[in-house]
Image: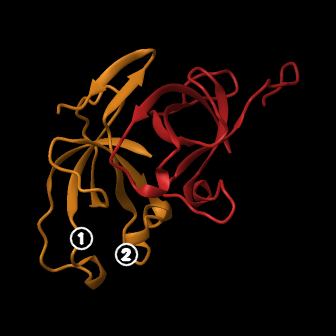
Chain colours: A red, B orange
């Protein structure tokens, strides 16, 4: 999983029915120092995150599995909110 | 997923049998500002997207999680047509109706 910062929100009425009821966010992948990594992605939220939140997300095929018994057409899914990062002084996350 | 703007239709007669009947679109990948980029992908359309529309593109095996596309040889599918985008607290894109 990777860290990311929620930076925006996308509204879409016409969408695959499996995405109904799910929030779509603009997600900026970041490193442990909150520095941007690459370009922004569109992510499915499964944990009630809000704009500005630091989250962790799964990519690829695993992003289709956030719910038991149902798969969604997503390749970027937010699966957790970061309360805080404890990083050893001088170390990396 | 990624944002993209539909730039055109890919017309193709000789194609994999399982792709027959599916609409292929040329999509320019864009950021939240929806400004054109130099990145293009060919995507199977699952939602009836049209030229000029901003859409959401799913890649990899996730692109086959759309019910109608389960057995289709695609790694890039359009799964949503974007109405509006809010970014940094401002509405930066709104679909023309």
The image's mark for residue B72 is 2
Q: Quadrant of the C terminus of chain B?
A: top left
Q: How many marks?
A: 2
Q: Residue at x 57, y 62 (%)?
A: A71
Please state the horizontal and vertical placement of residue A92, each as a whole percent of the image.
78, 28
User: Which residue of the protein is positioned furthest toward the bottom in this rendering?
Assistant: B17
Percent coordinates x, y for residue A26 in the rendering: 47, 32
Circle 2 chain: B
Residue at 63 percent of width and 43 percent of height: A46
Horizontal side, residue B3 vs residue A24: left or right: left
Picture quadrant where residue A90 is located: top right
Q: Earlier in the sequence, mark 2 or mark 1?
A: 1
Q: Secondary structure at mark 2?
A: loop
Question: What residue sits 32% from the left and 61% below the top?
Answer: B46
Q: Quick check: B42 above or below A27?
A: below
Marks 2 and 1, Cα distance to the nearest angstrom? 9 Å
Q: Position of residue A8 (x, y in %)?
A: 47, 25
- When the figure is inspected, residue A86 is found, relative to residue B47, above or below; the finding is above
**Does A42 sit left or right of A61 as displayed?**
left
Q: Residue B61 versus residue B65: which sits nearer the camera?
A: B65
- Please state which of residues B84 and B20 is positioned toward the viewer in this rendering: B84
Q: Helix or strand or loop: what does disc 1 sit on?
A: loop
Residue under the image location 27 percent in, 27 percent down: B94
- Residue B41, numbered label: none
Q: What chain does badge 1 belong to?
A: B
- In this rendering, position of residue A18 left or right of residue B86: right
Counting from the top left corner in percent of width and height, residue B65 is at 48, 65
Check contact, mark 2 vs mark 1: CB within 8 A. Answer: yes
Point out which mark residue B22 bears. 1
């Amino acid at each position: 999983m990777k860290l990311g910062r929620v930076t925006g929100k996308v509204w879409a009425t016409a969408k695959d029915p499996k995405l109904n009821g799910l929030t779509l966010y603009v997600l900026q992948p970041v490193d442990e120092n909150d520095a941007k990594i690459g370009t922004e992605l569109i992510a499915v939220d499964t944990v009630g995150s809000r704009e500005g939140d630091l989250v962790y997300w799964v990519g690829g095929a695993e992003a289709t599995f956030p719910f038991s018994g149902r798969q969604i057409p997503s390749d970027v899914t937010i699966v957790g909110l970061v309360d805080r990062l404890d990083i050893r002084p001088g170390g990396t996350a | 997923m990624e944002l993209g703007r539909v730039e055109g239709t890919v017309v193709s007669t000789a194609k994999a049998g399982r792709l027959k009947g599916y609409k292929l679109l040329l999509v320019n990948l864009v950021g939240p500002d929806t400004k054109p980029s130099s990145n293009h992908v060919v995507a199977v359309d699952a939602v009836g997207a049209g030229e000029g529309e901003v859409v959401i593109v799913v890649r990899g095996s996730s692109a086959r999680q759309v019910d109608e596309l389960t057995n289709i040889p695609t790694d890039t599918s359009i799964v949503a047509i974007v109405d509006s985008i809010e970014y940094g607290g401002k509405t930066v894109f709104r679909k023309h109706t």
